[in-house]
Image: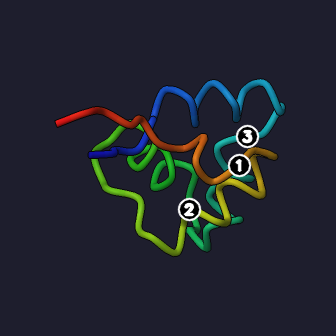
Amino acid sequence: MERINLSYIAKRRMEQGLTLQEMAESLGFKNASTYLKYEKGNYDFKANHLPVLAKKLKCELHDLFIFSVC
């Protein structure tokens, strides 16, 4: 089973020097606060967000996941 690695996304965003607003705009959101709700886990990232995140964060798609054995 896999789940989104929210801490990796936040860490990688900061390493890349990207603002919450830049991330929001890349996903088509108007406000940084909306993006932050996704990054904090209040909302779930959708499947179509993941390739955009990987490109913006300059990482591989699989880096966005935590894989665990059931």
Amino acid beneath label 1: Glu
Q: Which residue appears farthest toward the left when viewing the image?
A: 70
User: Distance between the Cα atoms at labels 3 and 2?
Assistant: 18 Å
**Spot occupied by residue 66 in the image (x, y as percentages of width and height):** 41, 35
Instruction: Give the vertical position of 31 relative to 49 (above or below).
Output: above
Residue at (45, 55) in percent of width and height: 34
Instruction: Give the vertical position of 69 relative to 24 (above or below).
Output: above
Nearest the camera: 59 or 52? Answer: 59
Amino acid beneath label 2: Leu
Mark 1: few, some, or many residues within 10 Å (few <14, many ≥20)? few
- 50 on left or right of 20: left
Nearest the camera: 37 or 56? Answer: 56
Q: What secondary structure is marked by label 3?
A: loop
Q: Nearer the viewer, mark 3 or mark 2?
A: 2
Amino acid beneath label 3: Thr
**Spot occupied by residue 1 in the image (x, y as percentages of width and height):** 26, 46
Q: Nearer the viewer, mark 2 or mark 1?
A: 1
Residue at (51, 52) in percent of width and height: 35
Mark 3: few, some, or many residues within 10 Å (few <14, many ≥20)? few
User: Distance between the Cα atoms at labels 1 and 3?
Assistant: 20 Å
Whether tag 3 and tag 2 are in contact, CB under 8 A, the answer is: no
User: Distance between the Cα atoms at labels 2 and 1?
Assistant: 10 Å
Residue picked out by circle 1:
60
Going from N to C along the chain, the mark reached first, 1 or 3, is 3
Nearest the camera: 27 or 33? Answer: 27
Mark 2: few, some, or many residues within 10 Å (few <14, many ≥20)? some
Nearest the camera: 37 or 67? Answer: 67
Res 19 label: 3
Residue picked out by circle 2:
50
Residue at (45, 70) in percent of width and height: 47
